[in-house]
Each structure stands twice: as structure tokens, then as C-alpha cells.
Image: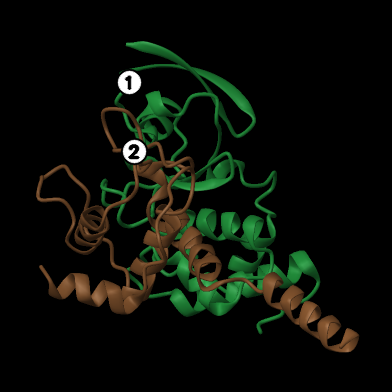
Amino acid sequence: MVQYPLKINDKIYFINSEPDKPLLWVLRDNLKLYGTKYGCGIGQCGACTVHLDGMPMRSCCLPIDSVGDKSITTIEGLSQQSNHPIQIAWEEEDVPQCGYCQAGQIMSAAALLERIPNPSDKQIERAMKGNICRCGTYSRIQNAIKSAAKKINGFYDDE
Amino acid sequence: MKHCSLILSSLFALTACQPTAKDKSMAIGKEIYIANCITCHQPDGNGITGVYPSLLKSNKISLFQTKRAIQLITYGSPFEAGMKPMHLSEKEIVDVINYIQNTWKNNAPLLTKSELKELKNSW
């Protein structure tokens, strides 16, 4: 066991863990942050997506030892009162069906809007390709991202 | 004559500012990398020691390495715990390889879709 200081949602936690324990299980088992979901366990579905220094990462295949001093953001820390533009747009567009993949979808979408504030349809498709939704809510996800872009920028410009 | 050289230099300046095919492919490739590769191979391409391999190449990138990259992305690794196939189109594979092979300290010529098809046919 090794002690790791982890910066998660702007708080420092000291976690005793095996070095190869995936970040997902540290979040869920050690810290009871259940918003991040276990999907496939092999980085193929995107349900476990969190941000590491703003980049979307699959926490199921990220050993805790590799995190270092990077800042981790989970769905619980995306906004203070679930009021990130992407979360508001998600609710307005009524995106989720079963909801299981949605935390991962939202985290990938939020990271996309940080990098590209006004993404085109193609850019949205590309960025969200690693997040699978078994209910097939893709068109609503696309609409919600455009709607959030509009909230952030005051307009949406799809060339 | 003076006019002519002015027009020519303006044209040169204009074309020099245009993104090249490589720049365009790499910009798209970067987004594909972020969506599909970044967790294992990390933002700096270094991977995670002992778990996921580095993508940084100290020597000139060979055609064999490009071919291997295409195979890994298309079919995954033959090892059980190895890389899984990525569900990417041929164009997306080309773009992500162009990004990987021309970022950090890597340097390789532009890979085109027709070259990818040729490499696939040569397996």
C-alpha cells in the first residue's frame, strides 16, 4: 500500500492504495463518489470518463500511480450546483434515457467545449465517439452540446 | 514589373498562411487522439511505464512502424490484456497517425488515405 495525495474536485484527499488500482475504484470505493460509472472496464465505452487537468480520461484503466499531481474532476465537481451550461442543456434537451452513460457523456462534452467552444457537428461526433450510449440518445446529446455552446458563447455557429 | 512582384509576393504570403494538408490532418487527428487514445498513451505520448507503451520514437519512423500502428488501431493487439481495436474510419486512422507521428519529437511524412489502403492490401 502506498499513500497518494489526490486533488479531486478542488479538495486534497490522502488515499492508501495499491499502485495499480484504477482511479475509477478509488473514486467509487474509497471516496464514495458514485457519479463516475463502471461500464466496460477496458476504456471502450466512456462511462467512467473524468477530467485530468481538463482532459477527458477513462478512469477504469488509469492506474492511481500514474495520476501524480494532476487535478481530477468528476461529475460531482463539474459545477457547484449542477449548473454547468452542459448540465443545464442536458436537462433542457431531456437527454438521458436510462442515464447510465450520461455522467461520462457530460464529462466528455464539457471537456470538448473547453477546447472548442463552438464545435461543428463533425467535431462533436469526433469528440464523443468514445462514449457509447446503449439507449441511442446521440441526437439529443448533439443538440444539448450545441445548446450549451450557445449558452457559453451567446450564439451557435455551425458552418 | 514592380506590380508583378508585389502580386507574386502577396500570393506567396497568402499561400504560406494556408494550413497544409498535414496541418489539417493533424488538427483532426489531435481530436481523435483525445477521444480515443489519451488515457493510455497520455497527453504527452509517453504512455504509462510498465502498463501502456510510449508513442515517442527517437529514430526516423519506418514504414513498418506505420503499418504496425494501422494494424493495432484496426485489429488491436494479439495479447489478451493488450490494446483493443479502435472503431475508427480509414480517414480517422490516417489523421490520428499523422498526429501521433508528427507530434512531440516524432517526425514522419504525411500519410494519405490511398497509402493506408496500399499498406492494408500488402498485409
Instruction: Please state the chain letter of the residue tagged with numbered disc 2 in the rendered image.
Output: B
Q: Residue at x 48, y 40 (%)?
A: B44
Above or below residue B87? Residue B30 is above
Check disc 1 and give the amino acid type: Pro
Q: x, y percentage for residue A128?
A: 46, 65
The circle drawn on residue B54 is 2
Q: Residue furthest front?
A: B1
Above or below residue B67? Residue B52 is above
In which image quadrant can residue A27 be found?
A: top left
Left or right position of B121 against A19? left
Left or right position of A95 against A117? left
Measure how far apart labels 1 and 2 are at the Cα level: 19 Å
Shade of chain A as shown in the rendered figure: green
Exactly how many numbered labels are in the figure? 2
Above or below residue A15? Residue B35 is below
Residue B17 visible here:
yes
Q: x, y percentage for residue A14?
A: 50, 16
Q: Residues within 10 Å of mark 1 (few under 14, many from 20)?
A: some
Check disc 2 and give the amino acid type: Ser
Left or right position of B77 against A139? left
In which image quadrant can residue B85 be found?
A: bottom left
The circle drawn on residue A19 is 1
Question: In the rendered view of the protein, which quadrant contains the C terminus of chain B?
Answer: bottom left
Q: Is mark 1 on a helix, strand or loop?
A: loop
Q: x, y percentage for residue A150?
A: 73, 72
Shade of chain B as shown in the rendered figure: brown
Instruction: Please state the chain letter of the residue tagged with numbered disc 1 in the rendered image.
Output: A
The circle drawn on residue A88 is none
Q: Residues within 10 Å of mark 2 (few under 14, many from 20)?
A: some
Q: Residue at x 38, y 70 (%)?
A: B92
Question: In the rendered view of the protein, which quadrant contains the N terminus of chain B?
Answer: bottom right
